[in-house]
Image (spheres, coloured by chain):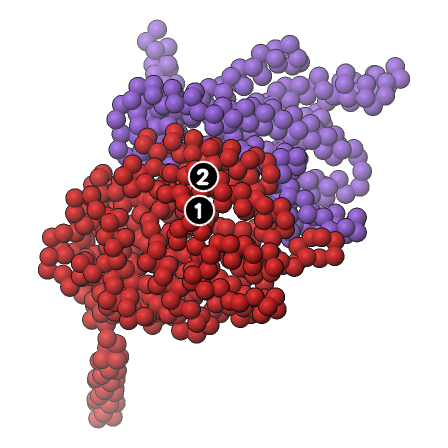
Amino acid sequence: MMRKKLVSIGLAGTLAAGMLSGSALAASTEGASETVSTGESVTLAVWNEPNKDDALNMYKQCEKATGIQVDVTVIPESDYSSKLNQMVATKDSSTDIYVVWETDIKNFAETGGIINLDDDLKDSSINTGDMIDAVSKLTEGLGGTYGLPWCAAAEVMYYNKDMFDAAGIDYPTNDWSYKDFKAAAEKLTQKNEDGTTAVYGMDLPNTQTWWAGIGGAGDQVYDPESGKLVIGDGAVSFVSDCAKMVKDGIMPEPSSDTSDLFGAGKAAMSWQGTWMIGSYKDTLGFNWDIATIPTNKVKYNTLHTGFYTINANSEKQDAAFKVIEYLMGEEGQTINSKASGNMSAIKSIAAEGAWKVDGAPVENWDAVTDALESGVFGYTCLPSGVTSNAVSEFDNALLGQESPEDAVKNASDYAAETIGY
Amino acid sequence: MKGTKKKFQIAYVFCLPWLIGFVCFTLFPIGFMIYNSLTNRKLTGTSSFVGLANYRNMFRSKVFWNSLRVTLFYTIVMLVITTVWALVLAILLNNKIKLNGLFQFFYFLPSVVPTVALAYAFRTMFGKDGGLLNGILGNLSGKNVTINWLMDPKTVYLAVFFVTLFTYNTGQMMLIFRSGIADVPKDLYEAVELDGAGSWTKFWHITLPMISPLVLFNAVNGAISALNGSFALLYPLSGENGDPKGMTQVLSLLIYKEAFSNMKVGYACALSVVLFVIAALFGIAIFAISKKTVYYET
């Protein structure tokens, strides 16, 4: 009997000790984590995957700082705008924060799909007076602040330093002219014995940088007043130049398997977004650097951003604003810049230089700041069907299937019948 | 009398599930589409009545007329090619040879691959620089072959119609033809063989008339599939603009582009109404032709 009592006391003691040690362990684990969960959660829709490194994942860091769980819904870029439009149309409430593109913010604000943030901003630490001018101008005329820019990105020219060295050509500078560029592209082109091209001097412009070339050749591209596509002589001139380069084998012709020839070491120069710096730093097997897109008649490139907005049908608008406040704050913006290579649209934060991606072999970081200064919001404000149609027309001209004049006219005609619907 | 009425009522009750489904999922969407075609509805849901403005704009648009031409051309050619190919395969499979089942498996296998995946695979094969087809042609010819299959007006239709041979629609047609050919009474063949008929005569005067109801069925299905299902095949191959020069921009691609890239839902609905009418006309035309050509055993 006594033995039984002793055993039961022993077991009870062991259990109590176990519980105590368990709670002590739990307490120590909680102490190790900085997260103080508020039990709140918000859902955020965006087109790019969050960084896999937790330290560079601004959403994870936001959770730690605010205690609000951030569920990220990644929607593929090709369907992003149309999915968000459908969510607004159906008054979907499953997503609290939309990262909205330039082309959509006005429509969403006008249809009441997103809320006016002015009241929240009054008591907020976000300094809306310190935004870069182009961003401020873009949202003028909406009757209030409906979105806050998650970053500001521009377009630059990437070049293969090894190929420039081999050809004995000086590296491009930020004051390179378009003539310098064309002459270098010709010299950098390497041909096979049968006359085909082994290495192109310049990669094909992509859907984004066609507009840098057209704007640089003097066209307005996008008229903010009328919201229309404005292309003409500049587009004809740039498309003609590209068609000639394709014909001479300096630039590849458009094809169904067009890939990143610059990244593959088969093109000496390429015009792309600044966000490629982060990707290229780990993948390119040659020496490279950047410069601004060469100046033709004017210095031109397109700015890119997205706006943090709050769904008007969200039931968690307060929590959503707290998350946005973190993401727009110094810590959130710095993490975003480090992860993506994109500059903050808040000038004082951008000036700290977190966007200079660690480990990238870039020496000419001024190219990014110069590009942002000369950048404008252009084709990104137009419906994607209009711009993709135009790029198809330009491709037709490059393939010799129609004249550059006809390509530009067809693109303009289609834009005219589409915009203003 | 009372009993008959009750029987009818019960019959209607049994029909009700189908009727509800038809009204909710067919009739209402068609009505809603027609209504929206008279508005300037955007993808965000805003909308106001604009009368026939979408139709007026459509008939003025050269993009629409090009798309209409491409749609008719694509539908007719695809219909002929896939039906003939399915029939040829079915005839080959009806020959009594070893491993017949294996051949049928391999012929049918591409048909069970989702169309989008199939189209992306072919897009890779048709690539100019790294494409499998150019690689094979290069090895055979000993030259550097760089045919821009999907971007060259001379080759794009060849490439696109080649892909249609491997779609689910063709595989399904093949199976239907095969079962039809197997059911043709053997004594008919034996009778004409006694008269010295060759293979072609047997096919033309016995096989084809006997399976003509299946040809009609496959033709109607094929036409509707070409009109409505072409999107899944052509979007991955040539994009929403139907490159090159809009040569592959069938109406279903244009509808997608207008609704989801340009956010013009009302206009896209007007285009859909046109597509709906074309599909109906194709059906009517095929049935009209079939009255003279289809043989039904009574």
Secondary structure found at label 1: loop
For mark 2, name the chain: A
Color used for chain A?
red
For mark 1, name the chain: A
Position of residue B282 relative to residue A177, above or below, is: above
Residue pictured at 38% horizontal, 63% vertical: A368
**Marking on residue A217:** 1
In the rendered image, is residue B78 in sight?
yes
Color used for chain B?
purple
Number of residue marks: 2
Say which amino acid is labelled 1: Ala
Name the residue nearer the viewer: A304 or A332. Answer: A304
Position of residue A405 relative to residue A119, above or below, is: above
Residue assigned mark 2: A233
Q: Along the horizontal axis of the image, is A153 left or right of A250? A: left
Q: Position of residue A119 (x, y in %)?
A: 11, 53
Q: Position of residue A30 (x, y in %)?
A: 23, 77
Q: Quadrant of the C terminus of chain A?
A: top left
Q: Quadrant of residue B155?
A: top right
Q: Quadrant of residue A103?
A: top left
Q: Position of residue A130 (x, y in %)?
A: 20, 61
